[in-house]
Image: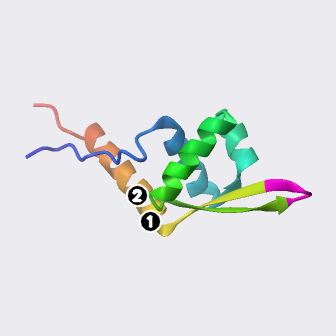
Amino acid sequence: MNPFKDLDPVLHSQLRLAIVSLLMREKESDFAVLKEKTKATAGNLSVQINKLREAGYIEVTKNFKDNYPHTICRITPAGGRAFDEYVKSLQSYLTVKQR
């Protein structure tokens, strides 16, 4: 029996994991805050947000604030479950007994 659980390929990216981790704590965040906290470029952050949205892990709302585009990202229930499962999978790697 394999003691190692599969890691979710959507979350197994440093930037996507960072985005979801931040959203797990904050529940929602705007693009500028995510960009600042992850130190990602706008283009890369945008691509990774779209991948998370397509997976159903976050929802994205776009509107305008002071005549500027304003993007808000929120964790979804599916995203929360995926994150929790990812953490459990990682723990399976840390708790394997040595023979």
Residue shown at the point (72%, 56%) measured from the top left? 71
Residue shown at the point (62%, 44%) measured from the top left? 46
On the image, the x and y values in percent for residue 75 come to 56, 61
Q: How many labels does the image show?
A: 2
Read off the magenta span: 65-69
Looking at the picture, which amino acid does disc 2 mark? Ala
Identify whether 78 is placed above or below 55.
below
Q: Which of 84 and 61 is in front in this view?
A: 61
Looking at the picture, which amino acid does disc 1 mark? Ala
Q: In which quarter of the image is residue 62?
A: bottom right
Instruction: Answer with left or right where residue 15 lies relative to residue 65.
Output: left
Quadrant of image for the C terminus: top left
Q: Quadrant of residue 63?
A: bottom right
Q: Is mark 1 on a helix, strand or loop?
A: helix
Colour mapping used in the image:
rainbow
Q: Main secondary structure of the magenta part?
A: strand
Instruction: Answer with left or right where residue 24 lies relative to residue 39.
Output: left
Query: How busy is the neighbourhood of tag 1: few (under 14 within 10 Å), some, or many (20 plus)?
Result: few
Look at the image and say whether residue 71 sits in the magenta stretch. no
User: Outermost residue, right direction?
Assistant: 66
Instruction: Answer with left or right where residue 13 lies relative to residue 38.
Output: left
Identify whether 13 is placed above or below 8.
above
Residue shown at the point (78%, 56%) measured from the top left? 70
Look at the image and say whether residue 67 sits in the magenta stretch. yes
On the image, the x and y values in percent for residue 5 come to 24, 47
How far apart in space, not on screen, are marks 2 and 1 (Cα)? Answer: 6 Å
Q: Is mark 2 on a helix, strand or loop?
A: helix
Confirm or deny contact between disc 2 and disc 1 (CB under 8 A): yes
Query: How busy is the neighbourhood of tag 2: few (under 14 within 10 Å), some, or many (20 plus)?
Result: some
| Residue under label 2 | 82
Rendered image: mark on residue 78: 1
